Amino acid sequence: MNFNSFGFFIFLLITFTLYYLPFLKRFQLLTVVAASFYFYAYTDPWLLILLLFSIFWNASIVYLIQTPDFKSKKAVLALGVVLNLSVLFFFKYSGLFAKTFIGSSGSSDLHWIFLIPLPIGISFYTFHGISMVVDFYRIGPDIFKEKVPYPKLILQSSLYINFFPQLVAGPIVKAKEFFPQIKTKNFKDIPWIAAAKILILGYFLKTVIADNLNDLTFVIDFPYNAHHSTLTLILLIFGYSAQIFADFAGYSLIAIGTAFLFGYRLPTNFNFPYISSNFSEFWRRWHISLSTWLRDYLYIPLGGNRKGNIRTYINLFLVMALGGLWHGAEWRYMVWGIGHGLLLLIERFLDQNIPFKLPENRFFSFIKAGFVFLSVSLLWLLFRLPDFETAVKYLKLLGTNLSLGTDGELCTFLIFFSIPVFFYHFYGWYNEKYQEETRENVSNIGYAFLLFLIVLNKGPSAAFIYFQF
């Protein structure tokens, strides 16, 4: 069920009404859990079975971990992590490894591997499961002051793993941040203004920017790209950078705004990433919930930067490579992650070994931000194109299509629908730098204008890009 569909608005209205009805108030948790199960099962009810198993075993492991006299807490923690990773590997990556090491024309007895379905949102809810068992092992008493009865724990775990605003594509929420929020909510406490602004911005980014750009950037694919000039191909790269930001940031904002309506706060997922002047900063601003998850549950347990430079480089490279593969069951995603990992390693090496630093002024900050954006945009080709070979061919076309005429109409629309993303980032940069007191008055007018554009200029409805992950 897409956030931008009419069916979702009906679903949201019914759930919201039942959630806050006074005589149903004591059933709030049950109401939102039931609604979340319906939301997930809407497209394919069979996939609900795996989700229910995930909830059951993670809640069971947490129940054992929070039992004071249970002796094997570390063992069940390891079991919980292995179970979550095993499910993720089996459903998402078994086909990739079978194709790589056996081949698609291998034994007919193994062809069933290629028919394994990819449950929607599995990358997100398995990470929630890992966060749940690890957080309760690390700081269980700080989350629950006393042992929670098993039936109540199952219900609360269902909400954490299956909360419908963030179930399919995040933001990824740590258990230690979400479980303390599970309590009775009051209608009067809804932050209406904040929720409305977040939702308007989210729907603007998705329906007006991302969906319209989606109708243009199909030209990136072969064979369409072979017939366009270098300038058009460059604008397509930047257009897709704007599209993927608007699409994913739009989803995250809609999820955050919807959660506000039910009394829950989800973490900020994007913080003007395209104004970053280095790659470390980019990953502190892009998909923040994933970056912090990888830092807390993978990078730091591997040793982080506490065991010398060589070990730090290895940890960074490994985390980025696995983070890339997390995005999809194709090697191009790992190559994408490796690309970012190499950029982070080079940046760290230069920071530590170059005796001079570039001046900290507006000109050099702009140059560095431009280089980061260009590098990130080129790597996005691995997201948009079907394989690494096609991405390399696209880069070659940049040098061979110089003589082709410019597609004026396509370029005009690419620029038109990309400009709001860059104005949005300029707005973020300006506010971070100058903290203008009048920005709230200006933004109120701006949100009204965005709502106007949502009504009049939304593009053809398209699925969110991150649904595939």
Image (cartoon, rainbow, N blue to C red):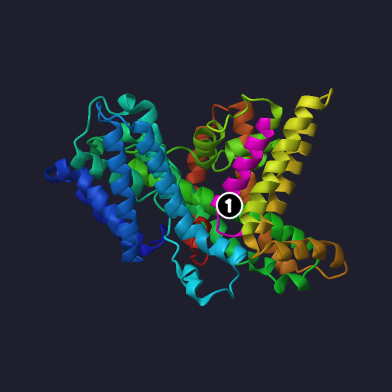
Residue bearing the label numbered 1: 325
Choose top left, top right, bottom left or bottom right for residue 101: bottom right
Secondary element at image label 1: helix
Q: Is residue 365 left or right of residue 336?
A: right
Task: Point out the image quarter for the N terminus.
Answer: bottom left
| Start-end of magenta stretch | 311-330
Residue 345 at x, y = what percent?
Answer: 72, 36
Name the amino acid type tagged 1.
Leu
* Residue 338 vertical position relative to residue 363 in the rendered view, above or below: below
Q: Is residue 351 above or below residue 195?
A: above
Give the residue at x 74% y 48%: 374
Q: Is residue 355 magenta?
A: no
433 to the left or right of 58:
right
Query: What residue sits 56% from the left and 33% below the top?
Result: 302
Is residue 138 visible in the rendered image? The answer is yes
Front residue of 465 and 263:
465
Which x, y percent locates residue 109?
48, 74
Of 395 and 440, which appears nearest the observer?
Answer: 395
* Residue at image coords 61%, 39%: 283
Residue extending furthest right? 403
Q: Nearer the viewer, residue 365 or 381?
A: 381
Is residue 317 rendered magenta in the image? Answer: yes
Q: Main secondary structure of the magenta part?
A: helix
Height in image: 306 above or below 190?
Answer: above
Visible residue check, residue 20: no
**The quadrant where residue 69 appears:** top left
Compared to residue 7, the image places residue 271 above or below, namely: above
Residue 57, image x, y percentages: 31, 46
What residue is at 31 percent from the left and 53 percent from the top? Answer: 53
10 Å neighbourhood of mark 1: few (<14), some, or many (≥20)? many
Residue at the outermost left position: 23
- Occupied quadrant, residue 146: top left
